[in-house]
Image (cartoon, helix red, strand yellow):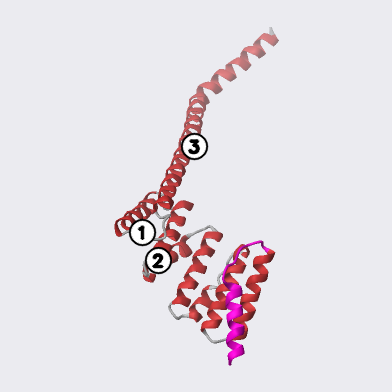
Amino acid sequence: MAELRSEEEQLEVVKRWWKENGTSLIAGAVLAAAGVLGWNAWQNYQEGQAEAASARYQQLVNMTASNVLEDDQLAAARELISEINDEHGKTLYAELALLLDARLAVQQGNLDDARTALEQVANSSSRRYVQSLAWLRLARIEVAEGNPEAALSLLDEPITESLAAQKANIQGDAYAALGETEQAREAWQTALELAQTQNQALYGVQFKLDDLGAKEATQ
């Protein structure tokens, strides 16, 4: 009887505990299930957004494959770039679209628009490689516009090591624009060495070095 009473008492304790806590347990389970479903829905949404951004970016690449675009093609491409940034602004594809936008602007001789697009990437991207590309292209624009000091300042940014050869190449261009021949030579030679070490193609650098030597020979 003592054992039975003990079991009955234990059962009563369980019943009482369940009465006091059962509702909150059920609610917690429901909320947990809703959280899992919500997370899965969010993941599915994110995947769908990434796929949509990827498809639109590929469309943009196809639209701009030609080196020469008609005015209506250029307008359509710029509109698509705006749409990608408006709807997928935090994705890699939006940043790549802006880099492409800058290239289109350069092809049209509009360096101000190119600078605006590149500065947006440089200032907002969390992807060091993409950010580095923006800094390098901004430096090229500064050299082209006769601002080699500004270009060298941009090249002081923490550009990723995988783009070190391209960085040295632009440094050489900036030094050459400043008339600092030896610094230009050293930078271009460094660019060639880095390109070889990293197994990268870097066109035009040897021609610049050869041209530098030819100019010195005629002086």
Prevailing SS of the magenta stretch: helix
Q: Which range is magenta?
A: 198-219
Residue named by callout 3: 39
What residue is shown at x 60% (from left), y 15% (from top)?
11
Q: Quadrant of the C terminus?
A: bottom right
Who comes first in sequence, dot 3 or dot 1? 3
Q: Secondary structure at mark 1?
A: loop
Q: Is residue 116 above or below residue 47?
A: below
Give the residue type that dot 3 points to.
Answer: Trp
Residue named by callout 2: 107
Who comes first in sequence, dot 2 or dot 3? 3
Give the residue type that dot 1 points to.
Answer: Leu
Residue named by callout 1: 69
Residue 43 image position (x, y, % from top left)? 49, 38
Residue 107 is one of the magenta-drawn residues = no
What residue is shown at x 65% (from left), y 13% (from top)?
7
Residue 211 is one of the magenta-drawn residues = yes
